[in-house]
Amino acid sequence: MIDLARLRQAFPDRQILHFDSVDSTQRVAAESPAGTIVLADHQAAGQGRHGHSWHSAPATGIYCSLVLPPSPVLTLALGIAAVEAIAQATGIQCDLRWPNDLMLDERKTAGILVQLINGRAIAGIGINVNQTEFPEDVAPLATSLRLHAGREIAREDILFALFPAIDSVVAEDSETILRLFAHASSYVAGRRVIVDQPEGSLTGTTAGLDPAGFLIVRRDDGTDTLIVAGGVRAIGS
Ligand code: BTN
C-alpha cells in the first residue's frame, strides 16, 4: 500500500488525489487544477500512446498523471526524471528508448503519455513495478522492475523520488534536457533501428537529436530522416 499521508506530508504544496480504482488518471487530471498529481492503484481503462491501452493491474504498478505547464521537450524531460527516480529509489538503471519508453533487458518497463488539453500538459507516467505477468499480447515486449531485479520493489520509494526529479528536470532549458537525454539513452546515437511509420518501415542507424528533440536516423545510403513520432525498435530485439 502507498502511504498517502506520508506522501502528502512530503509534498504539502501539491494536491495529491488517490483512487483505489479509476478509469484513467489522465481523465481525472484533465479535469483538475494546475499542479495536481493523480495516483491510482488500478486503472480500468489505462491509456497508452497512439490509442493503445495501458495494462494497469491492481496494486502492482505506478499509475500517475500530473497537470503541468506545456514545455517544448516535456516528454523527453519526463523520461529522464523517471529514469533518475527509479535509479535513486532502487539502484536499477533503465535505458531510454526515444522518445519516452523506459527499457530494461530490451523490454519496456515504463511509458509516458503527454496530452495537450486546453493549454495544459496532462503528463501520464506508467511504471511496471511489481508485475510478474502480463497479458499475452504485451508479454514478449514488457517487463517490470521486479522481474528485472528478482525482488519486490516499494512503489512508494519511487514516488518519493519521482516528484522532485520531475520538478528539477522540467526546470532545465531544452538544450540541457536534450543533452541529459542523449546521455541516458543508448538509442540516440549509433544504434541500428527499424522505425515503423504509416508509409512503411525504415531501417538505419540513429544519429542524434535535432534541436526540437526529434530523432535523426541515417539510412544506409547516407540520407537522414527525422523521426517525429516514435515506433523505433532496435534491430535484433
Ligand atoms: C505508453 O504507451 O508508453 C504510455 C503509457 C502511459 C500510461 C500512464 S499510466 C498513468 C496515466 N494514465 C493513463 O491512462 N495513462 C498514463
Image (spheres, rainbow, N blue to C red):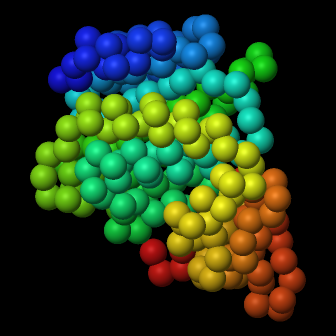
Question: From the viewer's perspective, is residue 58 above or below residue 125?
Answer: above
**Is 67 on the left or on the right of 163, as rendered?**
right
- Give x and y (percent) for residue 226: 82, 66
List the single residue furthest toward the left.
151
**Is 28 on the left or on the right of 229, as rendered?**
left
| Along the line of sight, the residue nearer the viewer: 170 or 47 | 170
Q: Identify which residue is drawn at 64% across, 77% down.
A: 189
Question: From the viewer's perspective, is residue 166 above or below residue 195?
Answer: above
State which quarter of the image contains the C terminus.
bottom left
Figure quadrant of residue 141:
bottom left
Res. 54 visible in picture? no
Figure quadrant of residue 213:
bottom right
Q: Identify which residue is drawn at 62% across, 66% down.
A: 182
| Along the line of sight, the residue nearer the viewer: 66 or 60 | 66
Question: From the viewer's perspective, is residue 168 above or below residue 102?
Answer: above
- Give x and y (percent) for residue 186: 53, 72
Q: Identify which residue is drawn at 39% across, 45% down.
A: 85
- Give x and y (percent) for residue 136: 32, 51
State which quarter of the image contains the N terminus.
top left
Question: From the viewer's perspective, is residue 32 above or below residue 193?
Answer: above
Res. 216 visible in picture? yes
**Is 23 on the left or on the right of 130, as rendered?**
right
- Give x and y (percent) for residue 20: 29, 14
| Along the line of sight, the residue nearer the viewer: 8 or 79 | 8
Please count the marks in the image: 0
List the single residue furthest toward the bottom.
221
